[in-house]
Image (spheres, grey):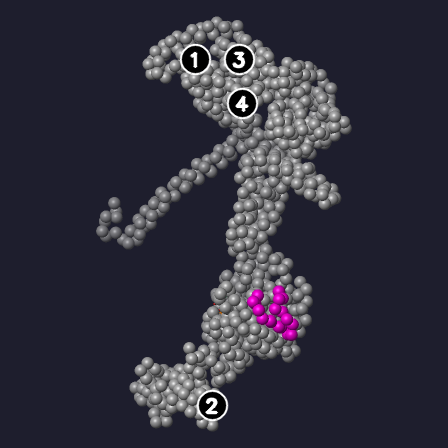
Amino acid sequence: MEHRFGRRALLRGAGGLAAAAVLPSLAACGTGTSRATTGGGSKTVIVRNSGGAYGEALQKGIYTPFSKETGIEVKVVNLSGTQMLAQMKQGRPQFDLIDNSLAQFARWVPENVLEPLDYDRIPSFKSAKLPENMVEEHVVGKSYYVTLMAYSTQAFGNKAPGTWADFWDAGAFAGNRSMGNPDADIPELEFALLADGVPMDKLYPLDVDRAFKAMDRIRPHIKKYWDTGNLPGVLLSRREVALSTVWHGRLDQLIAGGAPLAYQLSGGRRQAQGHAIPKGAANVDAAYQLIDYTLRPEVQAGIAKFYPANPAVAAAYDKLTAEERAKLPGAPEFFDKGFDVDIDWWLKNESAVSKRWREWARD
Amino acid sequence: MTDLGVATPTVAGAGDKPAAATGKSLSVVALRKTYGPMVAVEDASMEIAAGEFVTFLGSSGSGKTTTLMMIAGFVEPDSGTITVGGRDVTRLDPQKRNLGFVFQQYLLFPHMTVAENIAFPLQLRGVPKDEIRRRVFETLDLVGLSGFGNRKPRQLSGGQQQRVALCRALVYRPPVILMDEPLGALDKKLRDQLQTEIKKIQRELGLTVIYVTHDQEEALVLSDRIAVMRDGRIDQFGTPRELFERPRTPFVADFLGAANFLSGRVEHHTDEHTLVRLDTGGLLRARQHALAKGAPVSVAVQPGRLDVCAPADAFCSGTVQSVTYVGTLVRVVVNVGANCSIRLEVSARNAPQVGERVGITADPDNINLFAAESAG
Amino acid sequence: MSVSTPALPAARIRAALASRRTRYGLLTALPVVIYLLVLFVYPILGTLALSLKDEQGGFTLHWYADTLTGINLSVLLTTLRISAETALASLVLGFLLAYAVSRMRPLFAALAMVLVVAPHFVSALVRTYGWIILLGDYGVLNEAMQAVHLPGAPYQLLYNEIGVVIGTTYVMLPYTVLLLYGVMRGVDRRLLAAAASMGAGRLVIFRRIYLPLVAPGLASAGLLSFILSLGYYVTPRLMGGPNQTMIASLIEQQVTKDYRWNGAAAQGVVLLLITFAGLLLLKVVGSLGASAKQRSNS
Ligand SMILES: Nc1ncnc2c1ncn2[C@@H]1O[C@H](COP(=O)(O)OP(=O)(O)OP(=O)(O)O)[C@@H](O)[C@H]1O
Ligand SMILES: [Mg+2]
């Protein structure tokens, strides 16, 4: 990765040259006013994201201000992983930039469908100071989503479950539980191990046998294994369960609406989300610009305002109020109380663990 | 299911050689049924004795089926009472009335074979299997359908289906059987044959039968009494002879005897007879009728009650228009006036020639008079 | 052409006409044939081929062995069981509902049908919530049953087999109701009157006359629900637990998560075969019943 800076300089030079070359003709047409500042030839970029409230937040926090600043129109598509892979394998993806989890990207790397990133084309990358595990050859991180514990504030009197050991303690914290189904996300073995006393920094490689033994203990209290992100909120607010694992952010609307629910911000499992460019993308240049824009601290802070996604750029938290930060498990106050998922370990073991989970879950 | 208990004793009695009368009396008082503004049946009343064979005779749409349906319990009367064997059944469910019914539309169960159809009412009554088999076979034989037991109803012709429907009602010998044109789809020969069978069974078991037909001859052959229906009303209820010889309305006279109608005025009364001056000019001698002198009347006389004679002795005369041979009788049409012809049935020996001028005479006792306004 | 020859024997003219008609017939049938080939035969053959290929492209029965052992077999059996339960439940419920509707006046019948079908246009998300409100521990049903002190209440009506069967039955209901409604409207009610005139009570009329008359409809409605249920995966996920995972869910998982098309193809083929077997079974049972009847009567 040493050669990065040299190449960047070269490319910047080339880009500038290209811009200079097209500029007169564009100006003559009278449409190229903002092109001069973009340094590229493309007017549109098509981004794939998973849509929903998250997609809306991205639109408000990133795409709209990005278009305003650069004049590049951002189009959004919501394709499934299978659809994307099929398009990319045919070499003609209908999107230029993918917003997805790093775990998902990691599975595509061997398929050879992602463009290796040229970090020189991402000027704000250096100042972003992303954590090491967010910088890959094909993928650059942008934010975290966190799986953590949530509970009904009315279920346990004045007590509140603080650790995974509490989650496992059906005596002190009586009530039904819900945990994730492998249909939704990778199995939640880490929580089982934490509950069983494994220190957070010694989790990986996971002791799968020990984890399932711990899962055995909680199983009688699990009413439903959730498979869609909104289900924990529904289950908790309808009092079907008192405790649940949940994707951070999914309860916010309910809580704002007065539902007696709360997150436990400690002990969460962080999974990185980021950007990658598919091979064969039509608007590579614009895609790089959007990646670059996303990594600016003020833009990062913006995402968190619209959606409780956790910025990956540490400097972004400085731009948030203490109140806003208190809701984010990715904030410096909580960062060390949670852990990052080990993508490599899961990449090797997910299939086997999921299969074992399914066998374990059936009688 | 308790209703089946009512039926069982009757059936047990009807097993092999039944005792005299198993039929039940039936009475209908002031039955009325309307469909919206349409009056289907109005003021129908009759007393039927146990073991009697009664026929409803009438034109299409006159309310025969509706009356039968009310007796069976499938149509609820607007008002009136129905009693079977002294028990008021007006508000009783059909299955509790213990009546048999042969439907105009056969209504065989399409999913059962012919034999199963006939066995069905017997099974309901808990008749042993062997007995059922025997009786189904017997009954089918009776209507000339032995060997058809394993067929499905849709594999039969209309007439065959009708016979199966008849079997199904007869086989369990209900004390009262209602039959809605049960032989309507059959040819003359089969019809005659089955009429005899029905009559025989009815007589032997003393069943009460109400029978619906369009066919006056059939009605005359079978019935103890006939109810002639018109426009939802019973015009007359009596023995065939009463209806034939003393029709109470021109409709009855026409319907049963296919009567000739002539119009005229009452001339005068003698001790025995009423004399009528016909519009054609002749003087007709009829039996005594309580009609005012000079009143317009309608004269009804059946073709079979007329005879040819010398024009001098006749109450009217004319030219023979046609002569048709029907066995030992000939049908003669005589033209007696401008648009007026009279039909006669006379012995072949007395047959006149076409174009011959003949007189027409009749026994005064066979001539019926009606006040003219009711002549329709 | 020979048609222009004047002295052509009549038979040959007819033959020429016939063959021309045949050719014309084939030509008009062509679009349908192509349609069927492209949309049904080709994908099915493709799936079949996929299910018999190993990772290197050679022939193998490994995927079938995999489908018919271990957890996959247990999922398959669960699928059959839940489908059968659904068929039964939707048949009984559909029968009652269709009967009630068939006895209504046409206007009310149409209204009732709309009520049966309408909730199906509600989104899955809202429906998830709706079921919890209705069937949850603190749902309408359980609260009501507790209010009347029903022993054992609250009952667990969600996230188990009961929940799944409630859900799948609900989805199937419009099909069975519509099918049975059509059959019931076709029953000549005078036949019931005929049976009543012979003294048959309500129960006997129902069992001996009405039921046999609607039986063909019941059989096809039952089979339809069974076959359609085989392919469910949203409802079992929504309303069941891990023990109610059905085969379609497994297929989906393999395709979208594991990118394992071969195993999924094998499971798809097995599902298809079960469907055909179901159809065959219906025919066999039908003809067996008919011949048994024949024998008992002869
Ligand atoms: N369900 C009904 N609704 C309306 N009108 C009816 C109904 N049933 C019978 N009617 C009417 O009542 C009248 C009597 O009908 P009914 O069937 O009793 O006649 P019928 O004497 O049996 O005639 P046919 O000899 O043709 O069988 C008819 O005018 C008929 O149109
Ligand atoms: Mg009639």
Q: Which residue is mark 4?
A: A57
- Give the letter of the chain under mark 4: A
Please report the residue visible at 56 percent of the width from the left and 45 percent of the height from the top: C116
Looking at the image, is B211 positioned above or below residue B296?
above
Q: What is the CA distance from the residue labelled 3 to the residue labelled 1?
A: 16 Å
Looking at the image, is C265 positioned above or below residue A105?
below
Number of labels in the image equals 4
Q: What is the CA distance from the residue labelled 1 to the residue labelled 2?
A: 127 Å
> Hey, which quadrant is residue B339 in on the image?
bottom left
Q: Position of residue C233 (x, y in %)?
A: 58, 35
Say if labels 3 and 2 share a chain: no
Please report the residue visible at 48 percent of the width from the left and 5 percent of the height from the top: A6
Q: Nearer the viewer, residue A336 or C271?
A: A336
Please report the residue visible at 51 percent of the width from the left and 52 percent of the height from the top: C107
Q: Identify the disc placed on residue B288.
A: 2
Looking at the image, is B5 positioned above or below residue A16?
below
Q: How would you rate the neighbour count of disc 1 (Cα within 10 Å): few for under 14, some for 14-19, many for 20 or more? A: many
Query: Would residue A196 be found to the left or right of residue C276 on screen?
Result: right
Q: Position of residue A83 (x, y in %)?
A: 50, 27
- Give the letter of the chain under mark 3: A
Looking at the image, is B4 positioned above or below residue B329?
above
Q: Identify the disc placed on residue A38.
A: 1
Q: How would you rate the neighbour count of disc 2 (Cα within 10 Å): few for under 14, some for 14-19, many for 20 or more? A: some
- Give the letter of the chain under mark 1: A
**Mark 2 and mark 3 in contact (Cβ < 8 Å)?**
no
Q: Position of residue A222 (x, y in %)?
A: 69, 31
Q: Which residue is mark 3?
A: A296
